[in-house]
Image: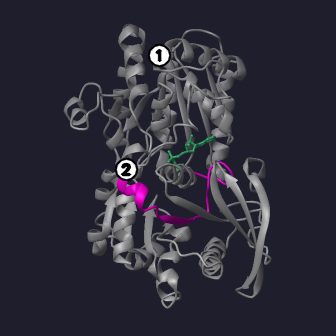
Amino acid sequence: LGGIVKETPMHIVHIAVEMAPIAKVGGLGDVVTSLSRAVQDLNHNVDVVLPKYDCLNLSNVKDFQYHRNYFWGGTEIKVWHGKVEGLSVYFLEPQNAFFHAGCVYGCGNDAQRFGFFCHAALEFLHQNGFHPDVIHCHDWSSAPVAWLSKEQYRHCDLSKAGVVFTIHNLEFGAHFIGKAMEYTDKATTVSPSYSREVAGNPAIAPHLHKFQGIINGIDPDIWDPFNDEFIPVSYTSEYVVEGKKAAKEALQQRLGLRKADLPLLGVISRLTHQKGIHLIKHAISRTLERGGQVVLLGSAPDSSIQNDFVNLANQLHSLHHDRVRLCLVYDEPLSHLIYAGADFILVPSIFEPCGLTQLIAMRYGSVPIVRKTGGLYDTVFDVEHDRDRAQAQGLEPNGFSFDGADALGVDYALNRAISAWYENRHWFNTLCKTVMEQDWSWNRPALDYLELYHAARKSA
Ligand code: ADP
């Protein structure tokens, strides 16, 4: 395949409203950046078109400069260009101030703002003389690209582009998704299990012939315990025990926890019902009961959930001040230290299209404890129950998992993990090494996307 790839480089344009690390809300932002980098590394040309939010983190944009302007939709649109993680990014800044709202989402008129952005992005490609082979759009927020490119740009070169639409989370804006599914040339979602779980959804069911699940990868350069400025000691799988010990001590020190060799449970999550809030709370108390430490990093978009956690934090911090810390903010650097310093990372989602948290955890040698759903099911193989399923993928079992959505389920997985830590440290350390050596990068999934891009271009 490498040879073919080199002979025929494709031009892929992502139209997206999130991009890590400059405008990231969740996994969608990570995927846009890391998939693009993997595809670019295979010698294809990738551009990303993004709104120029006033809240962009511009310190992570290199060579940021004014590119051009154009008029569309009753306003002037300024276009800026820069490099993010080595990727070429065009930033659209409509002078109607749609993206001067201090946030990515949550402005009340998101559908209108992003609908405008999608059309403006296609107009930019058209006026700039771009002839991409593939236009890749994501979730409800850039779903309009799928139909606008086919309807409004039918008579120009842009219509020769294959359109790929990826559903990162069907829960958001499902009513936009049916129309995009109808018009897009190919559609994906972010894991095979989630693709089966949503196959019956009326937005998707009629289009199964062009729909497939491709697991997300993580970017091994962005998440790299051997080269991570946020952790105290670099480590590879060979020195996983030493590296994680140093990271755990640094984490304990930073958060004012007791510096001791205790099992440490990490949780890094948006705090929404999808993520299994009641299960997270239960796991915190069970871990404390069993003498462990807990660090939770998470924030809730819903203020009543946020308040609820603030109260819980106050309670727990006074009861067990040296064993638990709830950090109710978004803090990327701290997330790195938790991934490295925790023994286990819990992801008890009620549903989970792919989930990146468990993949990042494994990259840092932390053992995932997950609920068996969606991408969590596809990537975490229970040490007792999933040996065959793991081996079918050429893998060793790599974590603890549970069914059900109640305390009993969590306990089943968590208790086994904690017991293994207390009673069988040598085995547990070997497990850390094993998970760290598994490849959850884009190496494999990027090839699946390339195949899909070729197919989309053919069906355009
Ligand atoms: P989702 O996209 O549903 O939020 P994913 O597991 O796909 O879930 O991606 C979550 C990403 O966001 C991970 O990279 C995780 O480390 C990060 N993350 C979540 N909450 C926080 C937080 N409070 N601070 C820093 N990073 C966070």
Task: Please name whichever residue, 196 or 460, is drawn nearer the observer in this view of the structure.
Answer: 460
Task: Please name whichever residue, 452 or 385, is drawn nearer the observer in this view of the structure.
Answer: 452
Q: Is residue 231 left or right of residue 449?
A: right
Tell me the quadrant of ligand 1: top right
Q: Which residue is mark 2?
A: 2
Residue 201 appears in the rendering:
yes
Disc 2 residue type (three-letter): Gly
Mark seen at residue 290:
1
User: What is the magenta range?
Assistant: 3-26
Q: Is residue 432 left or right of residue 242?
A: left
Q: Residue at x 35, y 36 (%)?
A: 380
Image spot of residue 112 (x, y percent): 64, 77
Q: Residue at x 75, y 88 (%)?
A: 74
| Secondary structure state at the residue bearing disc 2 | helix
Residue 404, image quadrant: top left
Task: Please name whichever residue, 24 or 414, is drawn nearer the observer in this view of the structure.
Answer: 24
Residue 73, image quadrant: bottom right
Image spot of residue 342 (x, y percent): 54, 23
In the rendered view, tell whether residue 271 sits above or below residue 118.
Answer: above
**Does 37 lie within the magenta span?**
no
In the rendered view, tell whether residue 202 sits above or below residue 2.
Answer: below
Residue 198 appears in the rendering:
no
Disc 1 residue type (three-letter): Arg
